[in-house]
């Protein structure tokens, strides 16, 4: 949607010959929104799993932020010293630098390292830069800004490379355990578990992956009067008796990055944004609705993406500790072999619910910036063929995201309740520790 | 993948001998020549397409038969959306379309399979057409066109209760209950949509009321559903694409093979001779095709037993393999086994009949495992040389599994239509699926077991081909071929063989009243040399098709022979001194004698299986090497148990040690009057090594006190490379068989190795026994070179690592699996031979002070994946010859001197962990990875940037994948020979390689032993092997049931088909011989013992 807006803008703008029109563009937060949206599109295209997608969002955003906070009159605080292992970025000595352009450039430069389809990213970047040039962006400003943007990007990338991501790529896969209580791959694709070693990724604000360990899951028991069994049957019954509203909620928050549809040997796939990507989308809505300026926009994305990143690590730490079996596995084995959840069960252990943890943490970041009772229309999923939904507040949205997993038939209530608590702890902690505004 | 270079190679050969294009066997006739103007055109729209009906591109069939009894074979072709057509043979390869006049085109929405059969026994062939496709309506009943005898037909399916409503694929008529009339098996593909199935829910036993396969018994002309009482599955998970009838156990009763698409396994129904069948596939076949398509059953090697070939979808061209294929991962494969779907793999299967209710799957050996999206298979003799060749029809109009389409392209179209129309626009979605013709395959049978691309067959035409049938359309003694195509004209191929120089005999059987075409008869041509050729009369063959029912035998230059016909009622006609080159009519009414059951292989008397000699069950611990090393294909954690047999309590009888796998205690069985008896005295000692994988062990006198001490090796891949449990241990014998561990850390305290081999000998001629210890793998780093260790004994059982003095080149020499000491050169010191993976059979000469590597020996260059060395004097010349067990040739891995397999080993993505990339060498001289794009990316994420889609990867050789620096820093290991082999010792360290019977190469060999089992004065050989823990992508190795090679003298060895009683299922890991007992150890199974007469 936004691309189209920009293209129209581009056509209109090239018509007039104003020499410093580029300044307006560079002050326009839509320029940064465009960069974020370009990244989201490529994340969807390249198919990143939810935790990895959170990493692809966070480092480019931090780089942009670190550039912005270097401006003389900046009201923003350096993240060096606040994020684990991050040193101060080099100062800029060239007065020609346009910080907004440098921020965008550092964003694209790091994005390019983290995504796979570089051509798509280059196209998006070139389109923006061509427009700026046509709007009179002086070569000297451009070169100076690119140079500084790259300097910061290199600094951030060197730091990012030490987060253990590359090493964990070849760590062992999970070896399936046969006991009933343990997670097993699920229909229809029976994929291997995703990111069993994500806890070994360096956190940004949290002390460690196990900074906030949720209380242990209920003991798996099929005894008819056990609490676990009640919760299992709740999933089964809710899905069987789902009303349209509940089904709508579940589908709205599905956020499955790759869904294969089998029709015999013929198949097709649908892709969507990840849960983290959805909250990036909500951040776009909030920054626009609040008329945030360029720096405020970057600040919001930075807070949200850091929350998402640490929340995923915290959640994945618990998932691969408790290794809780998915409801679909137990229901098929013990209750109803024909039962199929509304949503496709994602390929990792059940407890705690990722969407609950990360949505709560992201909502708290947004609440800190834009306040509670920030009502908004969530249009994030429209371009994936889903309707809009309206929310009174970020927390309202996060609560709906959490409970959607029960309606979808992929989580027990415990994973949602405890996931919200875990997300709250992560979000509050980050809100408390991470200082971005002076 | 190996097919890639074979194809390239053959392309070159083809070009270089283009002047011989006159030799092209089959001539493609166009419609003006033949008069057959048929084209199965398909169109699709939003409501009816491949997403709505999964068998959309399965195409039509072909039936051949003489409908007007003029001696000329007529042709019926089915179409999906268009009208079926009947073509009358006017002679001289001219056909006339009589579809309209004959009233035989049918009225239904979508036709599939077709069979010609005389249902009403009036001597005129009727036509049974299967119908499907119609999703909603009531317009898919099968049709039966009864021949009125005047070139017209009357549709009468309902009258016979044959108007089946299922999604029928095909039907086969045969007399399963031997009541003289023809019954029918109707193959129905499930109604249920794929994608809604949960594998845990195995619905095989549940009858599907709507569809489901059906067996119908003919009761006085009415067909009655007897599916359930006959023991036939007819469930919603039956995705039958092939029904193949024939007698697989030579008991005279017809059996049934059903090939099922998708996740359901195939079925093998053995006729119980009482009106019912026993579905026995899982006990007779190991590996089977995953998405099985068509099949055929015939005798490929003229041994009198029907073999079965099943088609699947594995591409033969490299670039297609890399763009349209995915393989099951290990976990999914295990899950399918657990839920009863057996061992299914993505490739064609050639189930070779062992003649003892077992099949060996040898498609990879025979070279017929990959032929792309294949439908029909026909096994018949194309060139009349006496060996049946193989035709495979190929092609799918849309490349449904194109990976770029699935991952990148389809989504964008779906999103577009979802946003615009709020629903998926299937038509647009299908429009963008790539469409590529794939050539049909013809393979020439070389010698019964090996096939090669039949390049001058003229049949390898790029197309979208489905059903096909052969028949002698011009009655000239060779078989012509018709192939039905989607959106292309039908192929009418005339066989141009010169039948003057290559002889034939064609048999026209005249059966009894209720089976006038004698379906189920067997015809045997007995040649002057005593060999015979064999065919069973079953017209329904290949895919959706039925062939010319008259058996046609190619005879090469043979002019005269005997003939034996076994009729369906088992009466026999014997005819002697028949002349070739004629069409011979034989009447069942003139048959003379009744035959008893064929018994080609009487039970042998050499080996007798005796139960309960050693009561031991090996348990392998659960460990998945693939979870740690993503790019390896074979596990190294399951190579035990290896047995050690020797007398540990000096009572003159051999005792038995079985080293335990991780989590299983090593045990000793003492030989007593009551046989082998468990000796628990050492349990506490062995408990210390419970968590080691004890791979090998030897008994030897380490401390020169006259009793046998124990070297217990620790290996496998399960432990951490830093674990103390990896040290090997020396245990001293107190003389009674009680062992006490020494404190020595072996092979030395600096090297915790995964041990693959340990042997002892007096290396330095000082009167005590020294050791060689070989390292199997670097744990977690498969492909990193391993070292050998020379440990010198001080006389008291204290060992010092003196490798640096004796053999510095043992450092990082290869992946050692076995070694043997012997004085090969007769100079009274112990020379050493070592073998392993990526190693030759390396011989090191002992010169008294050091080992010397002799570089000029042939065997050095035989770089293999060696598993086992065994020494024996096979030629009775007083020196030891070498029998070496290798990976074998029934594998997707193929290697030769010219085209070696290579392992590039390096930390290519510089993330701190190394990876080994296995490649094959193509005819262009370049090395290509076996791994698919996503498997390489799974190990090296960075490659996804280099290859953002499958298209960009499809032609990338190793030099495109890695840069020059990365390759220059890589360790490259090679394999150029995968045959199990015998090296005959000619003295002076010179060895002569001899070629073994082909069957030896059917599976990897891990165990070898020898003795004069048949008491004829020379040493015969037993071998065992198989490897089940390999990735589905390459398939498991399961074709061996034990090998008995009889020594015929003169370095000739004969493979005995049923092993003369040596028949072993499972993964054989060791064979030892004690007196007149053969003891066989198997992984994750019990110990077997065989007695032989001595």
Image (spheres, coloured by chain):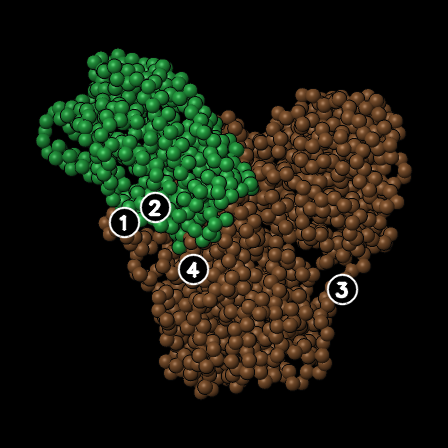
Q: Give the chain coloured green.
A: A
**Callout 3: 10 Å neighbours few (<14), some, many (20+)?**
few
Q: Check whether the beta carbons of the residues at disc 2 and disc 1 lie within 8 A of each other.
A: yes
Task: Give the alpha-carbon distance from disc 4 to disc 1, as whole Å.
Answer: 25 Å
**Marks 4 and 3 on same chain:** yes
* Disc 2 element: strand
Report the chain holding disc 1.
Answer: B
In the rendered structure, find residue B418 and report the number of the disc placed on it: 1
Report the chain holding disc 3.
Answer: B
In the displayed structure image, the side of residue B589 where residue B378 appears, left or right: left
Report the chain holding disc 4.
Answer: B
Q: Check whether the beta carbons of the residues at disc 3 and disc 1 lie within 8 A of each other.
A: no
Q: Nearer the viewer, mark 4 or mark 1?
A: 4
* Disc 3 element: loop
Task: Give the alpha-carbon distance from disc 2 to disc 1, as whole Å.
Answer: 10 Å
Q: Check whether the beta carbons of the residues at disc 3 and disc 2 lie within 8 A of each other.
A: no
Q: Check whether the beta carbons of the residues at disc 4 and disc 3 lie within 8 A of each other.
A: no
**Marks 2 and 4 on same chain:** no
Residue wearing tag 4: B192
> Which of disc 1 and disc 4 is earlier in sequence?
4
Residue wearing tag 3: B602
Task: Check the image and report above or below for A254 versus A94.
Answer: below
> Which of disc 1 and disc 3 is earlier in sequence?
1
Kindly identify the residue that appears in the image at 56 percent across and 50 percent down.
B337
Report the chain holding disc 2.
Answer: A
Q: Give the chain coloured brown.
A: B
Q: Position of residue B1049 (x, y in %)?
A: 81, 53
Q: Position of residue B808 (x, y in %)?
A: 70, 24
In this view, the residue farthest toward the right is B651
């Amino acid at each position: 949607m936004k691309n189209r807006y920009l293209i129209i803008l581009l056509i209109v703008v090239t018509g007039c010959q104003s020499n410093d029109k580029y300044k307006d563009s560079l002050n326009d937060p839509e320029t940064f929104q465009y960069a974020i949206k370009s990244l989201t599109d490529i994340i969807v295209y390249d198919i990143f799993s939810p935790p990895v997608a959170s990493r692809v969002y966070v480092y480019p955003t931090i780089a942009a932020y670190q550039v912005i906070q270097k401006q003389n009159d900046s009201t923003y605080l350096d993240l060096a010293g606040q994020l684990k292992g991050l040193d101060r970025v080099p100062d800029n000595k060239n007065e020609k630098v346009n910080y907004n352009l440098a921020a965008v450039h550092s964003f694209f430069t790091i994005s390019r390292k983290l995504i796979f389809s570089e051509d798509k990213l280059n196209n998006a970047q070139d389109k923006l830069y061509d427009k700026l040039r046509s709007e009179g962006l002086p070569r000297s400003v451009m070169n100076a800004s690119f140079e500084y943007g790259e300097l910061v990007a290199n600094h951030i990338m060197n730091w990012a490379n030490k987060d253990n991501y590359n090493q964990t790529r070849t760590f062992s896969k999970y070896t399936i355990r046969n006991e009933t209580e343990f997670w097993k791959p699920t229909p229809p694709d029976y994929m291997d578990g995703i990111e069993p070693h994500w806890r070994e990724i360096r956190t940004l604000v949290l002390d460690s992956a196990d900074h906030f360990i949720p209380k242990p899951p209920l003991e798996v028991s099929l005894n008819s009067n056990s609490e676990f069994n009640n919760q299992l049957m709740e999933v089964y019954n809710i899905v069987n008796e789902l009303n349209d509203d509940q089904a709508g909620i579940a589908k709205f928050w599905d956020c499955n990055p790759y869904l294969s549809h089998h029709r015999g040997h013929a198949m097709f796939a649908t892709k969507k944004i990840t849960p983290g990507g959805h909250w990036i989308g909500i951040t776009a809505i909030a920054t626009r609705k609040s008329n945030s300026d360029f720096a405020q926009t970057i600040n919001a994305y930075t807070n949200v993406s850091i929350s998402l990143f640490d929340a995923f690590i915290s959640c994945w730490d618990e998932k691969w500790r408790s290794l809780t079996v998915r409801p679909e596995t137990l229901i098929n084995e013990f209750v109803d072999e024909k039962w199929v959840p509304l949503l496709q069960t994602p390929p990792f252990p059940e407890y705690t619910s990722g969407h609950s943890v990360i949505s709560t943490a992201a909502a708290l970041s947004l609440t800190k910036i834009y306040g509670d009772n920030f009502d908004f229309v969530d249009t994030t999923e429209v371009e994936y063929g889903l309707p809009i939904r309206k929310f009174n507040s970020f927390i309202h949205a996060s609560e709906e995201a959490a409970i959607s997993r029960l309606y979808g038939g992929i989580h027990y209530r415990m994973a949602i309740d405890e996931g919200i608590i875990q997300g709250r702890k992560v979000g509050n902690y980050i809100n408390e520790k991470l200082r971005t505004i002076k | 993948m190996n097919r890639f270079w074979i194809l390239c190679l053959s392309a070159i050969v083809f070009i270089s001998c283009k002047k011989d294009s006159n030799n092209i066997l089959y001539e493609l006739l166009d419609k003006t020549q033949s008069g057959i103007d048929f084209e199965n055109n398909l169109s699709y729209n939003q409501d009816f397409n491949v997403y709505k009906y999964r068998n959309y591109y399965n195409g039509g069939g072909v039936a051949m038969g003489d409908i007007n009894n003029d001696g000329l074979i007529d042709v019926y072709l089915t179409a999906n959306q268009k009208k079926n057509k009947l073509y009358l043979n006017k002679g001289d390869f001219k056909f006339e379309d009589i579809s309209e006049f004959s009233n035989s085109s049918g009225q239904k929405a979508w036709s599939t399979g077709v069979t010609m059969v005389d249902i009403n026994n009036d001597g005129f062939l009727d036509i049974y057409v299967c119908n499907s496709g119609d999703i909603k309506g009531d317009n898919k009943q099968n049709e039966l066109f009864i021949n009125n005898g005047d070139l017209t037909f009357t549709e009468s399916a309902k009258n016979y209760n044959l108007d089946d409503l299922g999604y029928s694929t095909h039907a086969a008529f045969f007399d399963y209950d031997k009541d003289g009339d023809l019954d029918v098996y109707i193959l129905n593909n499930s109604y249920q949509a794929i994608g809604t199935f949960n594998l845990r829910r195995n619905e095989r036993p549940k009858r599907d009321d709507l569809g489901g396969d059906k067996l119908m018994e003919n009761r006085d002309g009415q067909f009655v559903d007897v599916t359930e009482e006959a023991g036939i599955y007819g469930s919603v998970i039956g995705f039958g694409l092939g029904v193949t009838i024939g007698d697989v156990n030579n008991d005279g009763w017809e059996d049934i093979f059903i090939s099922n698409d998708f996740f359901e396994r195939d079925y093998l129904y053995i006729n119980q001779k009482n009106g019912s069948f026993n579905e026995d596939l899982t006990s007779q076949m190991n590996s089977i095709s995953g998405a099985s398509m068509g099949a055929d059953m015939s005798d490929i090697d003229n041994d009198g037993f029907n073999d079965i070939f099943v088609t699947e979808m594995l591409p033969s061209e490299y670039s297609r393999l890399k763009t349209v294929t995915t393989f099951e991962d290990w976990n999914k494969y295990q899950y399918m086994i657990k839920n009863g779907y057996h061992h299914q793999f993505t490739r064609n299967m050639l189930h070779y009949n062992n003649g003892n209710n077992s099949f060996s799957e040898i498609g990879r050996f025979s070279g017929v495992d990959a032929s792309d999206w294949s439908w029909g298979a026909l096994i018949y003799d194309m060139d009349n040389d006496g060996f049946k060749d193989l035709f495979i029809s190929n092609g799918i109009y849309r490349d449904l599994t194109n990976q770029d389409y699935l991952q990148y392209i389809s989504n964008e179209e779906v999103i577009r239509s979802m946003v615009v129309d709020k629903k998926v626009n299937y038509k647009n979605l299908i429009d963008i699926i790539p469409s590529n013709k794939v050539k049909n395959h013809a393979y020439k049978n070389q010698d019964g077991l090996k096939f090669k691309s039949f390049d001058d067959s003229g049949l390898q035409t790029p197309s979208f081909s489905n059903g096909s049938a052969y028949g002698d359309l011009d009655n000239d003694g060779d078989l012509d071929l018709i192939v039905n195509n989607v959106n292309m004209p039908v192929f009418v191929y005339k066989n141009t063989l010169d039948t003057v120089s290559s002889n034939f005999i064609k048999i026209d059987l005249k059966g009894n009243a209720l089976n006038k075409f004698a379906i189920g008869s067997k015809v045997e041509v007995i040649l002057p040399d005593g060999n015979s050729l064999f065919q069973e009369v079953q017209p329904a063959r290949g895919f959706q098709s039925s062939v010319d029912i008259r058996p046609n035998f190619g005879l090469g230059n043979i002019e005269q022979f005997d003939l034996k016909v076994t009729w369906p009622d088992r009466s026999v006609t014997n005819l002697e001194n028949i002349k070739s080159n004629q069409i011979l009519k034989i009447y069942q009414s003139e048959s003379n004698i009744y035959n008893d059951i064929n018994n080609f292989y009487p039970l042998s008397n050499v080996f007798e299986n005796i139960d309960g000699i050693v009561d031991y069950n090996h348990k392998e611990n659960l460990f998945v090497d693939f979870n740690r090393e993503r790019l390896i294909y074979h596990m190294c954690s399951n190579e035990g148990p290896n047995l050690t047999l020797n007398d540990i309590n000096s009572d003159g009888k051999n005792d038995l040690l079985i080293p335990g796998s991780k989590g299983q205690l090593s045990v000793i069985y003492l030989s007593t009057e009551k046989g082998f008896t468990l000796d628990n005295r050492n349990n506490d000692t062995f408990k210390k090594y419970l968590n080691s994988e004890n791979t090998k062990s030897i008994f030897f006198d380490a401390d020169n006190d006259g009793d046998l001490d124990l070297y217990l090796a620790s290996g496998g891949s399960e432990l951490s490379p830093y674990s103390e449990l990896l040290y090997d241990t020396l245990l001293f014998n107190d003389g009674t068989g009680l062992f006490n561990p020494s404190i020595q850390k072996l092979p030395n305290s600096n090297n915790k190795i995964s041990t693959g081999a340990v042997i002892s000998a007096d290396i330095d001629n000082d009167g005590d026994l020294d050791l060689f210890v070989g390292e199997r793998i670097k744990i977690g780093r498969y492909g990193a070179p391993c070292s050998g260790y020379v440990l010198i004994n001080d006389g008291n059982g204290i060992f010092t690592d003196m490798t640096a003095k004796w053999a510095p080149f043992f450092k990082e020499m290869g992946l050692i699996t076995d070694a043997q000491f012997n004085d090969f050169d007769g100079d009274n010191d112990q020379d050493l031979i070592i073998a392993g993976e990526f190693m030759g059979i390396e011989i090191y000469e002992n010169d008294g002070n050091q080992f010397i590597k002799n570089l000029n020996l042939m065997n050095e260059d035989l770089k293999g994946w060696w598993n086992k060395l065994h020494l024996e004097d096979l030629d009775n010349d007083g020196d030891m010859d070498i029998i070496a067990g290798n990976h074998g040739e029934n594998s997707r891995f193929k290697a030769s001197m010219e085209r070696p397999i290579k392992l590039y080993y390096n930390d290519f993505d510089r993330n701190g962990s190394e990876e080994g990339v296995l490649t094959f060498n193509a005819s262009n001289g370049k090395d290509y990875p076996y791994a698919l794009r996503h498997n390489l990316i799974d190990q090296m994420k960075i490659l996804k940037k280099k290859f953002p889609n499958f298209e960009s990867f499809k032609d990338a050789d190793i030099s495109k994948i890695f840069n020059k620096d990365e390759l220059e820093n890589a360790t490259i290991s090679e394999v150029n020979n995968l045959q199990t082999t015998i090296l005959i010792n000619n003295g002076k360290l010179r060895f002569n390689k001899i070629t073994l019977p082909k069957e030896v190469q059917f599976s990897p060999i891990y165990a070898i032993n020898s003795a004069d089992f048949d008491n004829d004065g020379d040493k015969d050989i037993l071998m065992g092997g198989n490897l089940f823990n390999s990735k589905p992508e390459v398939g498991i190795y399961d074709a061996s049931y034990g090998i008995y090679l009889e020594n015929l003298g003169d370095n000739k060895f004969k493979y005995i088909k049923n092993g003369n009683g040596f028949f072993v299922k499972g993964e054989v890991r060791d064979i030892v011989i004690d007196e007149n007992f053969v003891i066989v150890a198997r992984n994750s199974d019990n110990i077997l013992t065989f007695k032989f007469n001595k």
